[in-house]
Image: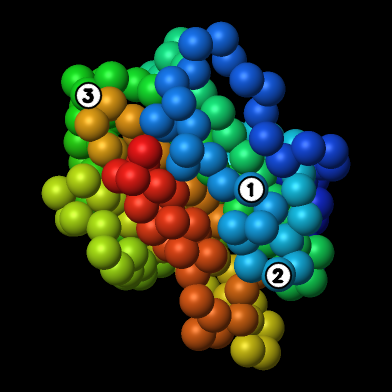
């Protein structure tokens, strides 16, 4: 119920893409996902930070989620999209930043440092406490030097996990963030990894 409440609170309604910002480059715009790019069962949602309402106790985990939600890049052109699934409850969000090569590199490096020290995500969400150990998240075909992929998860009922997935990827001056917090079936393919892989391929082809 905790995860479902978090998902529904974050999902909202309406279009799944953020309003255009003036001057957003066409190259990064190619990476923005549409409803046809996500798994069946996901509906468009209002774009907002993926981890809004999640309050980590550890400063390194807090730093990681802040970077995932765009801290340090809020002054650069950005386009985003978001989707939600009602059952089992999950959200899938994407933000594409035209950050420039230097800031993209610095943001990825800072996120890697934070992730290395955030081995267990202990956080308050609403009136409940989470304690999710970090586990590997594979994103095939994305180069390790340009990618950070982490997952925090624990079992949540029979055959399900409460899972917070995060993928960051840089390509030149573009910085991509895909996140999927929510409930997933054990062994379910990562929607965040698949979305990041598709978006990255479009960046390379733009």
Residue 75 visible, this angle: yes
Which residue corresponds to the image point at 57% horizontal and 47% vertical from the top-left?
33
Q: Position of residue 81 (x, y in %)?
A: 62, 40
Q: Position of residue 30 (x, y in %)?
A: 47, 38
Against 206, is 36 above or below?
below
**Local SS, label 1:** loop
Alpha carbon distance from label 3 to label 1: 26 Å
Q: Which residue has dot 3 on it? A: 101
Specify the label residue 80 is tagged with.
none
- Farthest residue, direction front: 205
Categorize mark 2 by other alpha carbons within 10 Å: few (<14), some (14-19), many (20+): few
100 left or right of 151 in image: left
- Farthest residue, direction right: 13
Q: Earlier in the sequence, mark 1 or mark 2?
A: 1
Q: Which residue has dot 2 on it? A: 40
**Local SS, label 2:** loop
Q: Are marks 3 and 1 in contact (CB under 8 Å)?
A: no
Q: Position of residue 129 (x, y in %)?
A: 62, 55
Alpha carbon distance from label 1 to label 2: 12 Å
**Local SS, label 3:** helix
- Farthest residue, direction left: 145
Q: Position of residue 2 (x, y in %)?
A: 74, 61
Q: Which residue has dot 1 on it? A: 34
**Which quadrant, please, contains the C terminus?**
top left
Q: Quadrant of residue 110?
A: top left
Alpha carbon distance from label 3 to label 2: 34 Å
Q: Are marks 3 and 2 in contact (CB under 8 Å)?
A: no
Q: Are marks 1 and 2 in contact (CB under 8 Å)?
A: no
């Amino acid at each position: 119920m905790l995860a479902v409440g978090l998902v529904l609170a974050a999902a909202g309604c309406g279009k799944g893409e953020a309003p255009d910002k003036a001057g957003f480059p066409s190259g990064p715009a190619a990476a923005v996902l549409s409803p046809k790019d996500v798994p069946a069962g996901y509906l468009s949602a209002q774009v907002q930070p993926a981890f809004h309402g999640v309050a980590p106790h550890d400063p390194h985990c807090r730093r990681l989620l802040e970077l995932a939600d765009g801290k340090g890049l809020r002054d650069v052109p950005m386009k985003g999209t978001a989707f939600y699934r009602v059952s089992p409850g999950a959200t899938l969000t994407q933000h594409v930043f035209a950050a420039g090569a230097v800031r993209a590199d610095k943001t990825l490096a800072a996120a890697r440092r934070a992730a290395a020290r955030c081995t267990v995500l202990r956080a308050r969400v609403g009136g409940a406490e989470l304690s999710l150990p970090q586990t590997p998240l594979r994103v095939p075909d994305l180069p390790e030097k340009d990618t950070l992929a982490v997952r925090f998860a624990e079992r949540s009922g029979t055959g399900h996990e409460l899972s917070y997935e995060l993928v960051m990827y840089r390509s030149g001056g573009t910085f991509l963030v895909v996140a999927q917090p929510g409930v997933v079936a054990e062994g379910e393919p990562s929607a965040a990894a698949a979305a990041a892989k598709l978006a990255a391929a479009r960046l390379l082809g733009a």
